[in-house]
Amino acid sequence: MRTVFDPENIEPGDYYRLLTASIVPRPIAWVSSVSADGVANLAPYSFFTVASTAPPVVQFTSVTRKDSLRNIEATGEFVINLAHEPLMDIVNASSANYESETSEFDALGIESEASEKVTPRRVAAAPIAIEATLRQVIEVGNCFVVMGDVVAMAVKPDFLADDGLPTFADIAPLSRLGRDEWGLTPPVRRIERPDRPST
């Protein structure tokens, strides 16, 4: 016997909390952008994934229209900074409702660095930064899915293994869970993907 939650009978805010407590863990896109007036913005989004590999496209979802979305629509550029465990408190602090005229970089003393191909700056301490240009914004209900073409990925050398790829253990990425819970680096099990179904 299961408890069934019908969205027709539940307030949207309560259903949001049910969804985010159930679809876990969710990686965090720490999105840096710049307004049309040149104000740098930095905010975390936990609805984030890859949309395409060829061409490489990433996506994140803004629940309602926020500064990051407005900035990206105005300038066509953004950076997804991957946050790791040592940055957890500052990532959380950057989620506060700052005024549009305030830069979270400045307000929180977050060091930035120039990006390779886009105007928004990267978070200097982030192990990986994904630079992107806007492909499209899709409105879905009260949300906006932001898709960006990846134009560069900047990875700190310390996070690259001998095969040239980042390792999960070294990145130690943060994730969001339900309520006010955050996920830390879990144990990893390696298992080969089969070439064909087993008989």
Image (cartoon, helix red, strand yellow):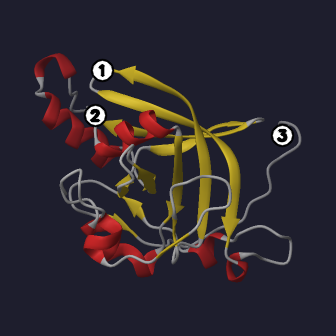
* Residue type beneath disc 2: Arg
Look at 36% across and 74% down and name the residue there: 88
Please tell me whether residue 193 is drawn above or below residue 188 in the rendered image. Answer: above
Please tell me whether residue 41 is drawn above or below residue 145 in the rendered image. Answer: below
Q: Residues within 10 Å of mark 1 (few under 14, many from 20)?
A: few
Q: Residue furthest top?
A: 8
Q: Earlier in the sequence, mark 2 or mark 3?
A: 2
| Image quadrant occupied by the N terminus | top left
Dot 1: element: loop
* Residue type beneath disc 1: Gly
Q: Horizontal and vertical percent for residue 14?
A: 14, 36
Dot 2: element: loop
Q: CA distance from mark 3 to mark 1?
A: 42 Å
Q: CA distance from mark 2 to mark 3?
A: 47 Å
* Residue type beneath disc 3: Ser
| Image quadrant occupied by the C terminus | top right
When asked about the image quadrant of residue 135, the answer is: top right
Q: Residues within 10 Å of mark 3 (few under 14, many from 20)?
A: few
Q: Which residue is mark 3?
A: 198
Q: Earlier in the sequence, mark 3 or mark 1?
A: 1
Look at 27% across and 53% down and name the residue there: 178
Look at 38% across and 29% down and name the residue there: 144
Q: Which residue is mark 1?
A: 141
Please tell me whether residue 145 is drawn above or below residue 107 in the rendered image. Answer: above
Q: Earlier in the sequence, mark 1 or mark 2?
A: 2
Q: Which residue is mark 2?
A: 65
Q: CA distance from mark 1 to mark 2?
A: 11 Å
Q: Horizontal and vertical percent for residue 171?
A: 59, 73
Residue nearest the viewer, comparing 22 with 132:
132
